[in-house]
Image (cartoon, grey):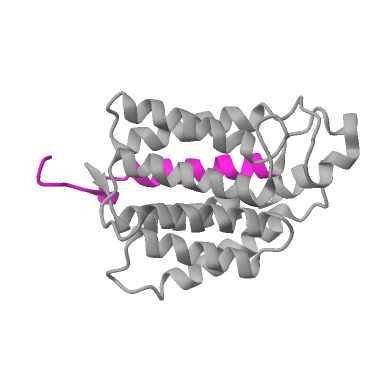
Amino acid sequence: MTLDATWTRAFIERTADVVREQRAALVELDREIGDGDHGENLERGFSAVRAKLGQQPEGATPGQLLKMVATTLISTVGGASGPLLGTAYLKGAAALGDATELDSAAVVAFLTAARDGVVLRGKAEVGDKTMIDAWTPAVEAAGLAAGDGAEPAAVLRAAADAAAEGAASTEPLVARKGRASYLGERAVGHRDPGAQSSSLILAAAAEAAATPAAAATTGEA
């Protein structure tokens, strides 16, 4: 089984839903070590994405849909999260090219390119208490799952589970990047909001893939 544009649309819709549902929690996380607007910014961005999703042509490929997410986030989300997540979606979309169906290798390529986009933009690494602490474990887990022959949905589930653990792992860290880095030891004990929102996005991808309608049957299936 592969994933197609139906999955991509479901992924985008589910992300908009979960960002809205978790808005207050993300605001609270960001208020503790940032400026408190992360949840509001993401909700505004993905609300705009949802509005544009309905305007996309029926035959839009996964890459085209994800590129739309990228450009919309970059233009509507304030702070650092807009450019960072926008670049993630943009690089991830480019990795998919014109593919209409995504196998496990394509899913890994998407996640890897997205993570690399965040690194390119933010210059962060694992342990800096940023969204990279969620993205890198996700990429590694996805690669292992795909290497073991897992289907795309299972690859995304492995990535999402690893991202959730990665987000939790930021709590004892001292921030080395972003606004939280100004707090020094006072940031210890608080979860990074960007890592948490990234884990929510990856969970939305896995949840969308678990829906039967999101999968396409290839001639080999």
What kind of secondary structure does the magenta stretch mostly adopt? helix
- Can you give x and y, in whole percent of width and height, for residue 151 in the image? 28, 34
Question: Is 157 rendered above or below residue 113?
Answer: above
* Quadrant in which residue 1 is drawn: top left
Question: Is 120 rendered above or below residue 187?
Answer: below
Measuring 56% from the left and 38% from the top, which residue is drawn there? 135
Indicate yes or no whether the magenta region holds residue 202: yes
Question: Is 199 rendered above or below residue 14?
Answer: above
Residue positioned most to the left:
219
Foreground residue, 118 or 28? 118
Give the magenta-colored segment's residue range.
Answer: 194-221
Where, quadrant-wise, is the C terminus in this rendering? top left
* Image-based side of 45 in relation to 105, left or right: right
* Image-based side of 79 in relation to 8, left or right: right
Indicate yes or no whether the magenta region holds residue 207: yes
Measuring 74% from the left and 28% from the top, which residue is drawn there? 171
Q: Is residue 189 visible?
A: yes
- Can you give x and y, in whole percent of width and height, for residue 198 in the image? 58, 44
Foreground residue, 182 or 168? 182
Measuring 44% from the left and 60% from the top, which residue is drawn there? 66
- Can you give x and y, in whole percent of width and height, for residue 84 in the image? 63, 53
Query: Looking at the image, how many numbered discs can be counted on the residues?
Result: 0
Measuring 56% from the left and 62% from the top, which residue is drawn there? 46
* Image-based side of 149 in relation to 67, left or right: left
